[in-house]
Amino acid sequence: MNILFVSSEVAPFAKTGGLGDVSAALPRELRARGHDVRIVVPMYARVHAPGRTFREVIPELVFALGGRIVRVGIYAATLPGSDAEVYFVRCPSLYDRPNIYGSGGDEHLRFAVLDWAALKLCQALRFAPAIVHCNDWQTSLIPLLLRTLFAWDKLFDGARTVLTIHNLGHQGTFPASAAAECGLGATLGSVHQDELHAGRFGFLLTGILYANALTAVSPTYAREIQTPEHGVGLDGYLRGRRDVLRGILNGIDDTEWNPAADAHLADRFDADDLRGKERCKAALLDGAGLPYRRELPVVGVVSRLVWQKGFDLCEQVLPSMLERRAFQLVVLGTGEPRFEEFFSRLARAFPRQVAFRPAFSEKLAHAVEAGSDLFLMPSRYEPCGLNQMYSLRYGTVPVVHRTGGLADTVWDFNPASGRGTGFVFEHFDAGGLGWALGRALDTWGSGAGSDRARWEHLQRNGMRLPFGWRHRVEEYLELYQQLAPGA
Ligand code: ADP
Ligand code: GLC
């Protein structure tokens, strides 16, 4: 099947979060099944890492966008671990910036150009996609473009669109004038008219209205976004399209995230032999400048430090918990100054217990996942979440809020039956988080010392779960085949 996969992030070339991981790992798995999947992503400044080379595919594609002439080049590289082709849209005036997102007033143009360029590229290559898989607001003009301005081209006759919602918190909403600037002037009547009259134009809303199928990145999130509480103003539209909306849980790249063969780690381990994990813990603490004590549990955090992730609860819970309970905390993340300052203060106040690394580092992320005993993810909302799955794979027991993909991947531990994989709190408040973290520390405490059997049992419950994409890709293929039978 010919699949065009368009995304604003693809790891390892450009990643700020899970979207980058998914946009590499899902196409990799599709390609492994023999499908012809082509990925399209902007050529940001950071794509040019040392040692990377790119093939020039098309020196110049020219198109008009609302009276502006746009010239882009298309370059290609192979997706690491695969022979799938990644196409990079080169347009230095739009993409050659230090940050992937938000560093100018032209965000709508940056991603409108991506959407147009992806379709122009298909035309130039005569690549007829059966499925055009769009991801988040940045690629949400494509379904409308295919139904209107590109509908004349027989190349796209068989094309069906899937829009995956990774995060409804980002909708790409701009002043109404953006629609014409994005090249939709000739088809303005197809854009949501009430919104236009109210002075707004929304990328994601446009995608939700026009995609042939919608997916959310977990079944629980697919339900949640249809409610006023989690719908961020789009729940009515999502309910209106509930017949084509489904939740498909993300997978993880279990080659990259495999504690038995992880090159980033001080040692390796698996469910049958956890000794290497203890050495990873010692190495993590050593690197973080904290004393190692086997009997003290280490709580890890790897995250964007933003409101979505629930760190305001940590502000309320962690200082008193660190005073009362014996544990250590290692935090890796960057984000809002408020949370960076909070974790810096915490590290200063508890220098033997807390380490904070305000950085983005793949290597450290692996070290924290492997070397921690517990993983803290108190997200306010979480469309899917990958880190809790990495944690489960690494025998690092997650403490999570029951929301979105966290609810679908972590089951509360019941000491009596021995079932469950983590510690889950229902109510998003300080009491909820304190309760779950307290229970986690109690469970550790009761199993520490000479008899770790109960803790290891809990670790193994999670380590044995099949979260790899190879177990998940079928759901996407089933959807593709329903949309494009015979392709
Ligand atoms: P989100 O996409 O909302 O940030 P996910 O859990 O889906 O949440 O994915 C986050 C991804 O980003 C994971 O691969 C995680 O390891 C990575 N990540 C987040 N912060 C950092 C960081 N500071 N350093 C390295 N990797 C990070
Ligand atoms: C978004 C969500 C996260 C999800 C990721 C990949 O960034 O915040 O929950 O795992 O996309 O789908």
Image (cartoon, rainbow, N blue to C red):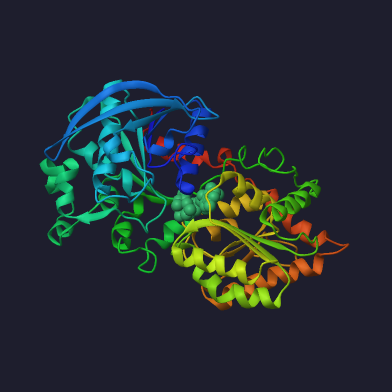
- Residue 163: x and y, percent? 35, 45
- Residue 370: x and y, percent? 68, 50
Residue drawn at x 12%, y 43% as measured from the top left: 185
Residue drawn at x 68%, y 52% as measured from the top left: 287
The residue closer to the viewer here, 345 or 318, is 345
- Residue 437: x and y, percent? 65, 70
Hey, which quadrant is residue 128 in on the image? top left
- Residue 336: x and y, percent? 44, 62
Q: Is residue 266 above or below residue 227?
A: above
Q: Is residue 239 visible?
A: yes
Looking at the image, how many numbered discs can be counted on the residues?
0
Locate the N terminus and report the quarter of the image it occupies: top left
Locate the C terminus and report the quarter of the image it occupies: top left
The residue closer to the viewer here, 146 or 312, is 312
Q: Is residue 197 above or below residue 90?
A: below
Q: Is residue 310 visible?
A: no
Horizontally, residue 147 falls left or right of residue 279, namely left
Horizontally, residue 404 falls left or right of residue 76, namely right
Q: Is residue 18 above or below residue 300?
A: above
Hey, which quadrant is residue 74 in on the image? top left
